[in-house]
Image: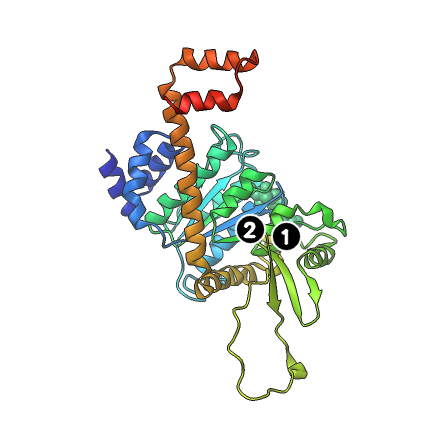
Amino acid sequence: MTDHLVEGVLAGDRRAIARTISLIEDNGAEAQATLAALHPHTGRAHIVGVTGPPGSGKSSLVNALALYFRRGATGERGEGGSPKTVGIIAVDPTSPFSGGAILGDRIRMRDLAGDPGIFIRSMASRGSLGGLAWATADAVKVLDAAGFELIFIETVGAGQAEVDIARTAHTTVVVEVPGLGDDVQAIKAGILEIADIFAVNKADHEGADHAVMALRMMLDLDLGGTATVLHHGRLMEVVRTVTGGEEPPSQGPLPPARPSAWRPPIFKTIATRHEGVVDLATAILAHRAYLEQSGQLVQRERERAAAELETIIQQESLRRVLACAQGEKLAALIDRIVRREIDPYTASQHLLGG
Ligand SMILES: Nc1nc2c(ncn2[C@@H]2O[C@H](COP(=O)(O)OP(=O)(O)O)[C@@H](O)[C@H]2O)c(=O)[nH]1
Ligand SMILES: [Mg+2]
């Protein structure tokens, strides 16, 4: 069964892909075996997280981006480089596909259905949201192994779980809408940290320029010729590109170029009219190139592998300890903690010690 599924996924068979993702959602042992067999075939896709508040236009934007990467700006396949295959995973607990897809998702289905180079899947939020983050990461691996070149993960930027999902991406696009105003507090700090690219969508609404300015203000701390940006939780110095004749006279050979940091660009978009989408798509590819050239891609892969391993060890050791302690013994220990006869630290030592 597992071999059959693995073969199917590697061949890009849509039913095998769908079935494997369902197994992952059910979190069975079979899913583990399948993922283990797929692992050597992963690591090629460019994973793009798209996050932002509900209704900000994430589905519409991902739809427009997918169309662009498939067909180019003018609707002709192959325009601006060869078309890329696109996988889309929507993680939106507030609007699951099944329970009445909202408009953006319906339009997406209409535009993208029938294209064999596109695979769309929404993840059901069974179980905890934390679990959903890992199920999403595993579903991405399935699409990666199946050969999809670009994989979009759409999440609602509402909490830690969504930030965790975004962290599994190489490039994170944060979607905001006008109305942000000057209230910079409205922008969640966590969202700023994960953003590689901003899209101020619904730019046909009033206040788009204001929103761009507010975001710029939050991102920039002007320090003379350099700017400092908050990126992945760290303050990084950015060498500002000097344009025109402002460049200081060169004195002898140029010093070796210092590694420059990525400065998250901000784009105004109108997803429903496919406006600003080419710039956004170009920035997504540019960010990937930046990650590769700066060595950050390798570093991120390591960090992700470490976090993943840690989570699996935590879950597995908890499962083993609880499996060893018979229900009664566990219940008795909990009773004793409640009666203040034993403290939870000592109780856990009892359990871990055998
Ligand atoms: N006016 C306008 N409406 C938009 C734009 N982008 C999306 N919408 C609409 O906003 C609603 C929510 O979009 P959707 O993509 O489902 O948002 P999501 O919840 O973030 O995925 C839909 O009715 C879209 O048609 C835009 O740029 N301008
Ligand atoms: Mg959506």
Disc 2 residue: CB within 8 Å of ligand 1: yes
The picture places residue 90, in percent across and down from the top left corner, at: 49, 41
Residue 174's disc is none
Q: Residue furthest right?
A: 182
Could you tell me if residue 45 is visible in this image?
yes
Viewer-nearest residue: 266 or 15: 266
The mark nearer the N terminus, 1 or 2, is 2
Disc 2 element: helix
User: Residue sitting at 41 percent across and 64 percent down?
Assistant: 78
Q: Could you tell me if the residues under marks 1 and 2 are in contact, i.e. CB atoms within 8 Å?
A: yes
The picture places residue 125, in percent across and down from the top left corner, at: 49, 31
Residue 302 against residue 23 in the figure, above or below: below
Query: Callout 2 environment at 10 Å: few (<14), some (14 to 19), or many (20+)?
Result: many
User: Residue sitting at 39 percent across and 26 percent down?
Assistant: 319
Q: Residue furthest bottom?
A: 252
Disc 1 element: loop
Q: How many marks?
A: 2
- The residue beneath circle 2 is 61
Disc 1 residue: CB within 8 Å of ligand 1: yes
Residue 201's disc is 1
Calculate the distance from the C-alpha at mark 1 to the C-alpha at mark 2: 8 Å
> Residue flagged by tag 2: what amino acid is it?
Leu
> Residue flagged by tag 1: what amino acid is it?
Asn
Viewer-nearest residue: 297 or 318: 318
